[in-house]
Image (spheres, rainbow, N blue to C red):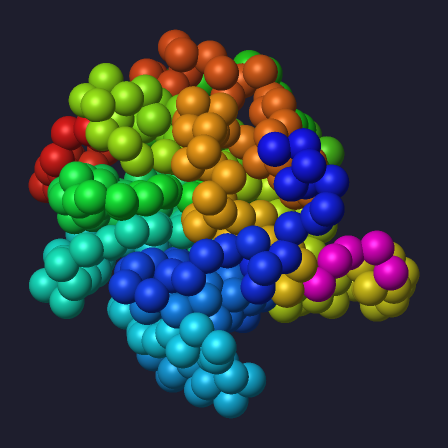
Amino acid sequence: MGAFFSRGFKPERDIPDLTGKVILVTGGNSGIGYATIRHLARRGAKVYMAARNEQRANAAIERLRAEGLGPGNGEVLWHKLDLSAPRNVQQAAEEFMKREERLDVLINNAAMLLVPYIKSHDGIQDIVMVNYIGPFAFTMALLPLLKMTAQEPNSDVSLVYLNSATHYRCPTDVRFRDLDDLNRDFEDTSFPQLLRYSYTKIMQLLFVRELQRRLDEEGVPILTIAVDPGEVNTEGVQAYASSVGPLLAPLYKLIVDLTFTTPTKGAYGPVFAAASPVLRAAPNAYRGAYLKLPGGLVKASPLAGREDLQRELWETTDGFLKGLGLVFPSA
């Protein structure tokens, strides 16, 4: 494994032929998700771009085709998904399972970054809904198809979640006992938007660990992996840079342009987690893992390892979704 990372990771060299594989990426009409889809489709996979806006998704797919999907000659298709409302998420999963008889990889890429505190659906703040509850519901609704695929010979099923080093900033006093906890606004701090974002990334890591534990107990050979893509110069980052005001925006943009990596390289992490043979060669090392290339495995915040918080968050989330009339297969 050390020799692998010492020579660097390149998808075109280190990812095998993915012909016959079905991969679903949430988001993807720009940034890291777009580059992730391009890497995987060029290795032959059928990749679904799960996004809310059909026009933007189809425009992105046309750009991908114009850039060329060879030599693997993969395929990219749009699938409607709105992560902001759990009922829509369940419907999207059900529609996907009508379209496909297998799902090899689910990459949860879509996310809100630093946004105002707003509750648009079901009494939960938007950033928690899109970054955590939506992916939770989507994963759980698709689990029967993922498990069925994992039972096939030579299968390699994984769940990949785009995380962030900002999760280390999450305060250690967080709890997940009820909806009030999920709606914590951090307005008593100096950087409430940043802390709300980091809060959702801790939620995601707790979910990844708890889901992996449950899958392991069932003996289901699915890997759940969180990936930090690093600091990436995406459209979302550029939009935030423009929002900080006329005095700070030029300086922030300069820092981003000089120090952040490109989406093409930022996508190396999720692509590695989704399809590298390295993971299946040592699956025990990667169960519920937190990854950051080029070094591979890194330590997440100690909060992510707290089993009491893992269970607490799961139970609160499950109870909230059941309250909406949504019941998913157990894991």
Instruction: Return the x and y of residue 223 as percentages of the image width and height.
Output: 37, 34
Chain part drawn in magenta:
258-262
The correct choice, above or below, for 186 with respect to 78 in the image is: above
Q: Confirm whether residue 214 shows in the render.
A: no
Q: In which quadrant will I find the N terminus?
A: top right
Residue 241 placement, left or right of 271 = right
Magenta stretch containing residue 259, yes or no? yes
Instruction: Return the x and y of residue 310 as percentages of the image width and height.
Output: 38, 19
Pick the residue in front: 12 or 310.
12
Residue 21 placement, left or right of 283 = left
The image quarter containing residue 240 is: bottom right
The correct choice, above or below, for 2 with respect to 93 in the image is: above
Residue occupying image coordinates x 46% and y 57%:
16
Instruction: Return the x and y of residue 77 as percentages of the image width and height.
Output: 32, 75
Residue 294 placement, left or right of 43 = right
Q: In which quadrant will I find the C terminus?
A: top left
Instruction: Return the x and y of residue 99 as percentages of the image width and height.
Output: 14, 67
The image quarter containing residue 17 is: bottom left
Residue occupying image coordinates x 32% and y 20%:
213
Pick the residue in front: 320 or 117.
320
Magenta part mainly helix, strand or loop?
Answer: loop
Pick the residue in front: 297 or 210.
297
Residue occupying image coordinates x 40% and y 12%:
307
The image quarter containing residue 323 is: top left
Residue occupying image coordinates x 47% and y 71%:
42
Magenta stretch containing residue 186, yes or no? no
Q: Confirm whether residue 157 shows in the render.
A: yes
